[in-house]
Amino acid sequence: MTRSGADTLPGLAPWASDPARSRGRRHPEAEAPTRTAYQRDRDRVIHSTAFRRLVYKTQVFLNHEGDLFRTRLTHSLEVAQLGRSIARSLRLNEDLVEAIALAHDLGHTPFGHAGQDALDACLRDLSEQTLPETAVRWGFEHNLQSLRVVDELEERYPAFDGLNLCFETREGVLKHCSRSNATRLEQQEPGGVAWRFLHGGSPSLEAQLCNLADEIAYNAHDIDDGVRSGLISMEQLSEVELFEHYRRQALTSHPRLEGRRLLFEAIRLMLSDQVYDVIDTTRDRIAASGVQDVEAVRVSPTLVAFSDRMRERTQELKTFLLRNLYRHPQVMETTHRARRVVTDLFARYLEAPSEMPAAHGQRREQARAVADYIAGMTDRFAIREHERLLGAVLFP
Ligand code: MG
């Protein structure tokens, strides 16, 4: 599809989230004189401690494996960029999209999914031992942890814990939630951010957009990082229809293109087309649904989406990455060591809480305090702590 220039900067669409009609903050605060509520949320996320930690947290490749691989921070920035770009075209609220995108991975443990799975297993093991601590039953889910970071764990303001973000930002941060944890959250905050996981319905279009922008971002950057690492090759990628299509397109325009520039050009074409596909499909779906405001969005099925064809071809790419990259023996081997670091640290801190900073060591619910402490760690801090406490060198 050819497009001429950017869409002119539009006002908000009637179905976009309007900060003036926000469902508000948990602790009421006066409005800022020059910024909207969602701009303020975005700013609070950027100034948070958890945000700065993202630079040393694994996306797929461990931080010490190379300086050029994506980290959680650069991934979050790419999600924000894609999200804003699509939001502007659809006249959705860019500030809300950016706030959600920058906060969506704040709850990730060190070592990516390996760390999360290990921490979840540690908590579940304890809950079988009937510890008198209810918190272990929550297990560990990174989306829920992102919400806990912005609701409780950040310590920056005199009057409340957390960042006290707007409902719409918090709703976007809680992208998934298990039914059992949604039930617990609903008890704490009736009709709040967990309600839709129990009763159905959709979040705002801005939250829906962040989910899709996340997926577009990691599919593209994992191809790039995968090839850079040498674990997958461009030849292998040619079996993926989606990638091959854009590689050929790049070669049609630039017949002598090769190597890294060919890879980048193919990824660039793919990203652009996916963005246009989402914009066109979503526009059609919004029109067909007849929604006229945010409340109608909340009772509609998901409206921000790929076309069926793009969804299918993206699924093929995801399957390829799962088989050839995320489950590559070298990645699995690192995963195995990462799980051991987290599991050993959990046992050690639980046995000796004084090894943690006092603020964590003195918390009433010890298992949850240990989980929060470990979840907040960067990869390299976790590795150092493991060496200090266990004496083993798992990542020389
Ligand atoms: Mg993400």
Image (spheres, grey):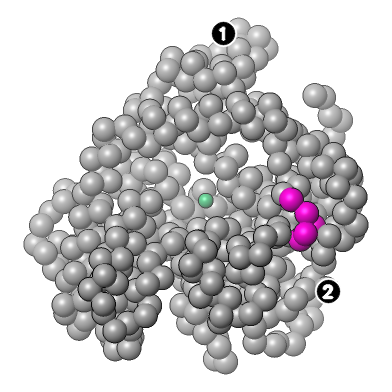
Rendered-image quadrant of the N terminus: top right
Left or right side of 149 for 125:
left
Left or right side of 187 for 1:
right
395 shown above or below 36: above
**Mark 2 or 1 closer to N-term?**
2
288 shown above or below 358: above
Which amino acid lies under the numbered mark 2 shown in the image of this protein? Answer: Ala
| Residue 285 figure quarter | top right
| Residue 267 figure quarter | top right
Is there any visible trace of residue 154 in the rendered image? no
The location of residue 333, given as percent across then percent down, is: 23, 40
The location of residue 218, given as percent across then percent down, is: 52, 41
- Tell me which residue sits at (37%, 72%) in the image: 137
**Residue with the mark numbered 1:** 256
Left or right side of 253 for 337:
left
Is there any visible trace of residue 194 in the rendered image? yes
| Secondary structure under the numbered disc 2 in the rendered image | helix
**Residue with the mark numbered 2:** 20
- Tell me which residue sits at (34%, 74%) in the image: 136
On whether residue 155 falls in the magenta region, the answer is: no
The location of residue 205, given as percent across then percent down, is: 74, 55
Specify start and end residues of the magenta stretch as a single range: 297-301
Q: Please rate how many residues cluster around mark 2, counting C-alpha atoms within 10 Å: few if below 14, some from 14 to 19, many from 20.
A: few
The location of residue 106, given as percent across then percent down, is: 49, 63
Left or right side of 246 for 144:
left
Real-space Cα distance between discs 2 and 1?
53 Å
